[in-house]
Amino acid sequence: MTKSLPPSAGEPAERILLGPGPSPVPQRVLRALSAPTLGHLDPQYLAIMDETCAMLREVFQTKNALTFPVSGTGMAGMECTATNLVEPGDEVILCVNGVFGTRMKDVFERCGAIVHPVEAAWGDVIAFEQIAAALAQFPKTKVVGIVHAETSTGAHQPIAGLADIVHRSGALLLVDAVTSLGGHELRVDDWGIDAIYSGTQKCLSCPPGLSPVSFGERALARMDARKTKPQSWYLDVSMLRKYYTGGGGGGRVYHHTAPINMTYALREALTIVLEEGLPARIERHAAMHQRLRKGLAELGLSYIPKHSLHTLNCIRIPEGADDAGVRSRLLADYGIEIGSGLGIMAGKAWRIGLMGHGSTIRNVDLVLAALKTILR
Ligand SMILES: *Cc1c(COP(=O)(O)O)cnc(C)c1O
């Protein structure tokens, strides 16, 4: 008797991904994924990993030796930075003005930190004065955490200048750059950022699966001075660095099997970023945002945040429009995915991502035409 196959959902469709991530992945990156799998200690693989880390330094605009892709999506980067930078009982100040700031608070609390939140309304950004006031109130603060691109609200948080305030009281500056790396101006060294994490599937246009992180000298000193081990074995940087940088004098040491093929994909995605050049890429994201914004205004659609990201456009659902109905027609009729509102924005917002490979005239004009037809 032959066994019949179970019912299948079929081949994955070719969508136009204009949501909050993942973003569209170029064929070059998909081809890189399918290259032969090497061993994780194979000298050629280690050379590929070194190239990948070198390109990550360029994209982060940093000289930090400890710059590598954590195995896991953006949330793994958040957990990795939190778990390594604080010990139980440490005080931290976290900026909360959306879903990802709220998550950062949850993650740090799970690490045993005492969290002092600094809040702004969803859609607003955090004022530096608020952070300075919190540092004055809680002078023992070890880390200040902030989200550069709050994907849940589309707010673009200024970062330049903040490190001066944070360092004056001896704290470290931690930045979530998941939706800004490769799409917005982001200067880790010039801005004095001590630790940062991102994700592959947003403005780098690589599939989800890795979380680029970078730690500066101050963060390294803090980690070296720990009295307790980080509670996560998998994300313990003191062990990971022996593999990713060959640090510690003993050469490369096995910790966990690196996601080999995802590293190929990330190397290719970063090559594409650097071929375009960071300034041109950032300029393209700005121009596509302006093009979308103008078109949305002509359709009578308005933005929720005052300071909008270029990579994520969070717009008010117009009076009388059917939230889920519009999104399912975009998907069914045009193959376009956009995002729904997240957290308290559910039912109130649509989120149109213009990230990496997806941020093009073709996609902007298509989503505008589709919305015009569907909303008519
Ligand atoms: C997407 C996102 C994350 C989480 O990344 P995952 O890849 O979904 O784990 C964290 N922070 C921000 C700002 C994000 O947009």
Image: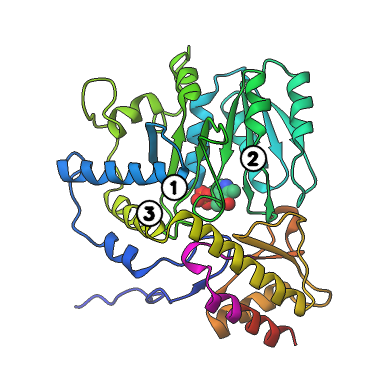
- Ranked by sequence position, the earlier of labels 1 and 3 is 1
What secondary structure is marked by label 3? Answer: helix
10 Å crowding of disc 3: few (<14), some (14-19), many (20+)? many
Q: Residue 16, relative to residue 246: is it above or below?
A: below
* Residue 43 appears left or right of 227: left
Query: Could one spot residue 24 in this view of the protein?
Result: yes
* Along the viewing direction, whichever of 347 and 353 lies nearer the viewer: 353
Q: Residue at x 73, y 83 (%)?
A: 375
Q: Amino acid at mark 3?
A: Leu
In three-dimensional space, the C-alpha distance between marks 1 and 3, rounded to whole angstroms, equals 8 Å
Quarter of the figure with residue 14: bottom left
Q: Residue 362, relative to residue 96: is it above or below?
A: below
Q: Are marks 1 and 3 in contact (CB under 8 Å)?
A: yes
* Residue 289 appears left or right of 301: left
Q: Which residue is mark 2?
A: 159
Q: Which residue is mark 1?
A: 59
Q: Amino acid at mark 1?
A: Val
- Ranked by sequence position, the earlier of labels 2 and 3 is 2
Q: Does residue 362 show up magenta in the picture?
A: yes
Quarter of the figure with residue 89: top right
Q: Residue 59, relative to residue 302: is it above or below?
A: above
Q: For disc 2, does the CB lie below 8 Å from ligand 1?
A: no
Q: Residue at x 41, y 34 (%)?
A: 63
